[in-house]
Amino acid sequence: MNTTTTSTKLIRDALVLTMDPVLGDIPQGDVLVRGNRIEQVARNLPSPAGAEVIDGRGMILIPGLIDSHTHMWQVPLKGQGTGLWGTADYQKHVFPLREKFGAIDMKDACFAAGMEMMDNGITTVLDFCHNTMTPEHAEESIAAHRRTGQRVLFAYGMLGSHQTHKADHAWRLAQVRELAADLGSSAHDSLIRLGIAVASLEYSSMEMVRKEVEMGRELGLPMTFHQNPPGQIHALGEAGLLGADLLPVHANVATDAELDLLAACGAGISFTVEGEFGGGRSMSVVGRAHRAGVTPSLGVDVPSRITMDLFSQMRLTYNVMRAEEATAERIAGRWPLARHPGTPHIQPRHMLEYVTVNAARAVGRGDELGRIKPGYLADLVLLTPGHYGMSLGDPAAHVALMSTPADVHTVVVNGEVRKRAGELVDLKRAEAVEASRRVRERVLGAGKGSPAPAVAESVA
Ligand SMILES: [Zn+2]
């Protein structure tokens, strides 16, 4: 993928949802892109000589969607996790398969994942790669990301297999340093950046986690970790390790006091609504975090059973948050539901903020991603309103609650058109299907390439 461009593009007459508090929504707005940056956002912009004009009439232009937590290596296992019950089922039937993945499987899987995400309007993803079984696993994953041309924060997984986690720690730390030097030496606007998926405390130790976080801070790498058992945010705070650069995922059991700790250091959380459903976890954290000023962002999390689509995540998260608010009202005796100051707290537009502005912060790029604003990187998605037209009211609510991946018409990443009029420009969907098929054959065995094995069969 060519990551630098000097070409000029003018997207004309779209309903532009800038997600910027000053610029707001611009009906029949124009966006001028020069190279990989947005240069102007206004109405009736003149078309510079030689500019490619993209007709946005009748469509909605949004910032490219940003997923703050997905394990991309799991895409070929799609269907393997549906119908599982609780995290123990997942830990038994899906997660151990990672040890059967070779480096070549990581390459095929990340390629298939990136293509599908980009097709669905996800221009940036935090790839929480908790399958760096060998240095080659990381290298091949990065090679795949280079090929798809998606913007990726490659969060290098520090968690090894239970048997070898401690013994392998030194080479993983060393490889992070090497990769940081390697990726850091390329152009400033390089599509792939390095981060660290810090090992889960419950499978590691505070001493090892401290080494990871201190190295991440020394190298300036964004970090993230799975936060499942209670008390970990408090413990990390006591250890002086919390920060705006350390993103907790799930955090369902976080107390309000722990959310205050996160808010004080400017941290967000990644909420993965279908992941939370699958684990049977409490959902109140996302609303509590929002109220506490801990910015939520969203992620697909486990592609083994969740579609690679942030529209579903927005819709489900909104309904979960509204349901949580309604439950609190019922418990307080305020029934039937009625508006009163501060309630309802959550609006559909918040969901679009979660997957743009908030998620840009979550991946460490809040100052140049997630908004359609002069100077920001040109990651843009044009959506059709669907075959049956726009809904009434707030257009951001239309995107958050009515849009689907089928509405993704045009995708621009880093100033390059990657999808045009519903078709990927230089990638064929069949390539991704074939890449997943190869992984299934190698990992699950001959004859398993297609279709996906039924869960009932694998669980039995
Ligand atoms: Zn996860």
Image: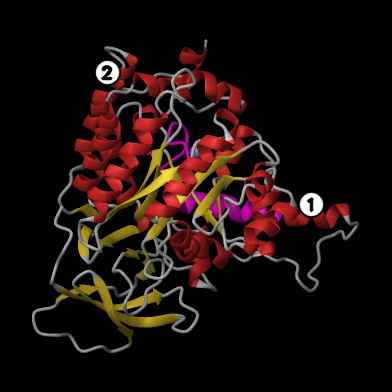
On the question of residue 300 being in view, the answer is no
Provide the secondary structure element on which disc 2 rests.
helix
Viewer-proximal residue among 257 and 323: 257
Q: How is the image coloured?
A: secondary structure
Q: Is residue 199 left or right of residue 239?
A: left
Q: Is residue 437 magenta?
A: no
At horizontal 37% and vertical 23% (from top left) the residue drawn is 452
At horizontal 30% and vertical 51% (from top left) the residue drawn is 118
The span from disc 1 to disc 2 (Cα, nearest Å) is 47 Å
User: Looking at the picture, does residue 173 appear above or below residue 268?
Assistant: above
At horizontal 28% and vertical 60% (from top left) the residue drawn is 411
- The residue indicated by pointer 1 is 327
Chief secondary structure of the magenta span? helix
Which numbered dot is residue 153?
Answer: none
Looking at the image, the residue that sits furthest to the right is: 333
- The residue indicated by pointer 2 is 442
Residue span colored magenta: 301-323
Q: Is residue 315 magenta?
A: yes
Q: Amino acid at mark 2?
A: Arg
At horizontal 39% and vertical 68% (from top left) the residue drawn is 62
Mark with earlier residue (1, 2): 1
User: Looking at the picture, does residue 186 appear above or below residue 172?
Assistant: below
Q: Is mark 1 within 8 Å of ligand 1?
A: no
User: Looking at the picture, does residue 220 appear above or below residue 395?
Assistant: above
